[in-house]
Image (cartoon, grey):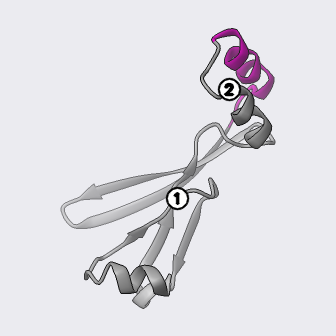
Amino acid sequence: MERIALVYDVDVNYVLIGHTHLPLYAVHWNCKPILNPGSIGCGKDGIARFAIIELDDGLVNVTYKQLEYDKEKLIRDYRKNSVPYGEKFISMFY
């Protein structure tokens, strides 16, 4: 995070990150809240974990959710529809 702070020397209220597919709320970087919204549909256990971030007149509300989904159906649909790089995604995420 320190390297990011050096490159992006901007005063912000929140820091949004991604890539890990895991929901996160932490206060660290320059005492700013760090949010990772998670991922819809990339859970090896068939559970999508994600955040809904609502902005309303300067107020921020973060709600973390999780929903079960049919992982085997998703894999079948990837293959049935010849999703580009589908096999790579299947091996990485499922």
Element under label 1?
loop
Q: Residue at x 79, y 37 (%)?
A: 91
Q: Which residues are magenta?
A: 68-81
The dominant secondary structure in magenta is helix
Label 1: few (<14), some (14–19) or many (≥20) C-alpha neighbours in 10 Å: few
Q: Is residue 66 above or below residue 17?
A: above
Say left or right for 60 vs 18.
left
The question of residue 27 being in magenta is answered with no
Name the residue: 47% across, 84% down: 3
Mark 1 / mark 2, whichever is N-terminal? 1
Q: CA distance from mark 1 to mark 2?
A: 21 Å
| The one of 64 and 29 positioned closer to us in this rendering | 29
Residue 15 occupies which quadrant of the picture? bottom left
User: In the image, what residue type sits under mark 1?
Assistant: Gly
Q: Secondary structure at mark 2?
A: helix
Return the residue at label 2. Answer: 86
Q: Which residue corresponds to the image point at 69% horizontal and 15% vertical from the top-left? A: 77
Rendered location of residue 10, percent (x, y): 26, 80
Residue at position x 36%, y 72% in the image:
14
**Residue 10 or 54: which is nearer the viewer?**
10
Q: Say whether residue 2 is left or right of residue 40.
A: left
The residue to which callout 1 is attached is: 18
Q: Amino acid at mark 2?
A: Gly
